[in-house]
Image (cartoon, helix red, strand yellow):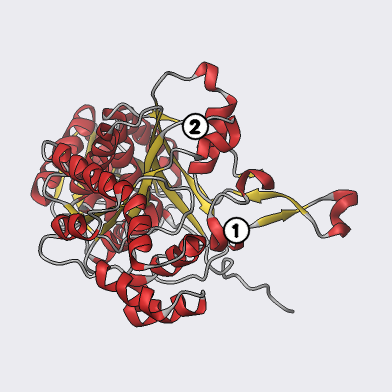
Amino acid sequence: MTTNNTQPARGTRDFLPDDVRRREFVVGVVRSVYERYGFEPLETPAFENIETLLGKYGEEGNQLIFKILKRGEHEASGQADLALRYDLTVPLARVVAQYQAQLPKFFKRYQIQPVWRADRPARGRFREFYQCDIDSVGSTSPVVEAEVLSAVSEVLARLGFSDFVIRLNHRRVLSALLDTSGVAEALHGEALVALDKLDKIGPDGVTKELAARGIDAGASARLLKAFAGGDDVMAALSTELGSHEAGTLAVAELATIVSLSESTAAAGRIRIDPSLARGLSYYTGAIMEIAVPDLAGSLGGGGRYDNLVGMFLGREVPACGFSLGLERILVVMGERNMFPPEIAHGAIDVTVTLWNDDARGDALALAGELRAAGLRVDVYPESDKLGKQFKYAASRHVPFVAIVGDDEQAKGEVAFKDLASGEQQSVRRADAPSFVAARLRALKGEHS
């Protein structure tokens, strides 16, 4: 008899209970912070019409879109008419265009849903993963960038990150540097695709890729020298771009964003990085990424994209947003042991043991009484030896087991055993819920 392969598809994962609890913990923090910044929830379908997605992400992005073949009588054509969602930003632009009359002047939304990319799986990089997006539509003010950076900084701080850095750049600064380095305008897109890989393949790798994309060695050398920066990046950029009007204005915009951020949760976190490119072609202004020391790649990124909504609407609508990568956050938090003990150690407060088959009804009744007080309760379903029931509860990281034997039944009591200390104490049945709740609060205090 042959058996099917039980591994999930490459680049995807199954989420066991502990995994789901960790993810829900992080999502809960993200949602609470986003809502306190005035962002409202939005959800869109898992798949879009293929023309909605194609042409929005640049050359490499198009290749990573998961296409859905036509179905039924059209299946044999091998053509695709739908595609799995690649990100949450393009669907947002479609929504803004579709529902413009129903949305407020300044539409601030958050969206926490999975996206799919036909990418090569690696550490912290998957083909199916969740994004946690915030976007603000309708304003060109740099207050928007400052608010976005503050919100994502507060999320990471509340999760326990203390060593993250926000890399900040501007697409018009990049364009100006390409101009002053001698890269022909027709090759700007090619150059940005290569430069986006600088932190992955290094200057030598980027030099080779620039050459492969038709950019001469002299322009490449000047470009990489400009990206090397120095102690005062802003001064260096101002000197480099002094005669380039659009570039100078973009440097001033970056300075304004940094200045506004000094009174927010992002204060002290921002580093101007002229080499930051971000591969998506729809960015038009400030671009940003969050980096931590022990992760290749970023915890999230975003920027201003004032032309994207206009692709659907026919007129320019300013917008800016940021996407936190939930999977990468979970990977780093797991490796650093950053989750609270109650998240990592299970989700049951009490296991009610079963003394014998005659006691099944009473065990269920006790479980109901404890649950009515807000406790999370598991009932052991079989009348095994108590030692086996204790072992089962310990395997699920349950702190307490409840025992109602003949003696406890006669006295109207419940015995509770603390599996960590081995201590056992009997209390009146009416007091059982408050007793467990108090012990759980004490345990939580020990862990905090």
Helix, strand or loop at disc 2? loop
Indicate whether 394 appears above or below 95: below
When asked about the image quadrant of residue 440, the answer is top left
Q: x, y (%) of residue 431?
A: 19, 29
Disc number for residue 62: 1
**Amino acid type, residue under disc 1 in the picture:** Asn
Q: Position of residue 412 (x, y in %)?
A: 24, 31
The percent coordinates of residue 437 (x first, y second) are: 19, 36
Kindly identify the residue that appears in the image at 58 percent across and 38 percent down: 311
- Mark closest to the chain's N terminus, 1 or 2: 1
Q: Foreground: 200 or 173?
A: 173
Can residue 360 be seen from the camera position used here?
Answer: yes
Q: Which mark is residue 381?
A: none
Residue that label 2 marks: 316
Q: Quadrant of residue 6?
A: bottom right
Q: Secondary structure at mark 1?
A: helix
Would you say 397 lies left or right of 163 here? Answer: right
Mark-to-mark CA distance, 1 and 2: 23 Å
The spot of residue 393 in percent (x, y) is 32, 55
The nearer-to-camera label among 1 and 2 is 2
Residue at the (60%, 57%) spot, across then down: 65
* Quarter of the image that includes the N terminus: bottom right
User: Going by the image, does 241 lie left or right of 365?
Assistant: left
**Image height of 126 relative to 399, above or below:** below
Label 2: how many Cα within 10 Å (few below 14, some 14–19, many 20+): some
The amino acid type of the residue labelled 2 equals Glu
Relative depth, front residue between 20 and 46: 46
The reply to whether residue 415 is in sight is: no
194 versus 323 height, above or below: below
Residue at left offset 25%, top offset 32%? 143
Quadrant of residue 294 in the image? bottom left
Q: What count of labels does the image hold?
A: 2
